[in-house]
Image: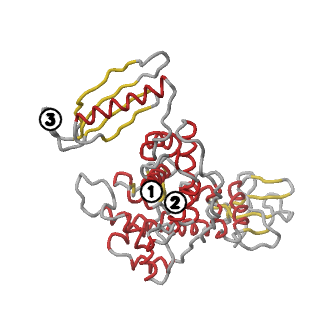
Amino acid sequence: MTGSTEGGEKARQAGAGARSYFGSIYRRCPCPAKVKTCPHSYYIRIRTGDGEWKRAAGNDPRTARAKLAEMQLRIEREGVLGIRETGKVTFPGFWPTMERLFQARLTGAGLRNAQGQYDIIAAHFGKRPLSAITTADVRDFLAGLRKPVAEGGRDSAPATLNRYMATLSSTFRAAVERSYAKGNPCEGIKRQRETARPVAFLPVEAIARILAACPGPYRAIAALAFECGARRGELLRLERRDCDLGRKTILIRTSKAGEDRLVPLSARAVEVLRGALAIPRTAAEPRVFPEVDGDHLSRHFGEWAEAAGYPGLRFHDTRHTAASWLAAAGTPTATIAAILGHRTLTMTLRYSRHAPEDAGARAMEAMGRARGQVPQERGAEKSGTHWGTHAATGTDDAAPFVVGEDAASPEGGEVCAVVGSGGFEPPEALAIRFTV
């Protein structure tokens, strides 16, 4: 698209203390500038100290100039006289302000979700001024979201309704601050009580059956999701250049948290990616899964899982399953959070219920190995821990020791770390020989 400037107004001052602004008209079309009546749309652009606004202004340049003059008059009235036309500002008209506010505090999927919610809100209220919307109107809007899809609603869950409420409330707060509304009609409406959805933890057999039920290219992306726990959008945007099979990692660019992250891959994930990368692509297609439609995947994954004998699942449950398996393997919570891209450990703690019962004991043993020692109770015969005699002294002081993995004594025994009354001594200081 090309934008040809049809006219412009130089930056000027409308009076003492007024804000400066710049207004212009342009059109998005390939027509030459000499064409007077263009079938394509004209737009007006207004720049002030608060930011930039762009609005459609019809197909006639004369109409566009008239609208530009009207906007300039409104700016002068607001900036010089302090007058705001509170009775005329609508959700669509207030979008430029909210867009800047959203971009200042949201990133990634959070920003896209807020924009999508605002579009639905603006479509519902249409040209109704913000100042005319009441608490009853907001309740009616939320009730419509709760209706089943068959009745014209969206069948929204309590958590989704709360997100819409947050978007509505932030919009009205911003409008009140700018004198476009007299109050926030969301005040007094209680938030919906959110119930935690059970975290899916599918066994290996279930994963295999679900993948077998997934058609064509959807099987590969689902298999990768089960293995690495990445989000749907992250896998759909995954590019070939970000797959390093040698290091067994993929790079997720601009995740939901707004940051890049490196995700390790299992052996199975490497196999899946190797097959996907082997499919010939054109140079203009960087994505790994270009043939996968995200909306189709979300709508039908539950159907495929139900056909495999596991109803009530969503594609996001592949992420929960991967995280649950990581927890069951004894992976530290902080490591799981890093792999999943969670901002806080609170989000990851819900998977801790799947941690092995002896996770604490394993942690203590790991600490012991890091120190070169694994103290256990007397008589323990597990994990290579034994009770023996100090080779250096020939005495038995009931000191436990563990087989060292990197060194062996001249007599054929293995070098071990010793923990006695004197504390830990490294293998090079005191060698213990024993016969297994």
Q: CA distance from mark 1 to mark 2?
A: 8 Å
Are dots 3 and 2 in contact, CB under 8 Å? Answer: no
Front residue of 4/312: it is 4
114 vs 61, left or right, is right
Which amino acid, by three-letter code, is at mark 2? Phe
Mark 3: amino acid: Lys
Q: Position of residue 204 (x, y in %)?
A: 51, 77
Q: Position of residue 107 (x, y in %)?
A: 49, 46
Q: Which residue is mark 3?
A: 36
User: Image quadrant for the N terminus?
Assistant: top left
Q: Please give the name of the residue rendered at 87% of the width and 56% of the height, measured from the top-left corner.
A: 421
- Of residues 357 and 231, the one nearer the viewer is 231
Dot 1 amino acid type = His
Measure how far apart labels 3 and 1 are at the Cα level.
36 Å
Specify the label residue 124 is tagged with.
1
Q: Residue at x 48, y 76 (%)?
A: 207
Dividing the picture into quadrants, the one containing residue 358 is bottom right
**Residue 72 coordinates in the image, percent (x, y):** 38, 28
Q: How is the image coloured?
A: secondary structure
The crowd level at tag 1 (other Cα within 10 Å; few <14, some 14-19, many 20+) is: few
Q: Which residue is mark 2?
A: 141
On screen, residue 353 above or below 30: below
Q: Do the CB atoms of the residues marked 3 and 1 lie less than 8 Å apart?
A: no
Which residue lies at the image location 53% right of the left edge and 67% below the top edge? 146
SS assignment at label 2: helix
Sequence order check, earlier mark of 1 and 2: 1
- Left or right, 59 with reference to 137: left
Q: Secondary structure at mark 1?
A: helix
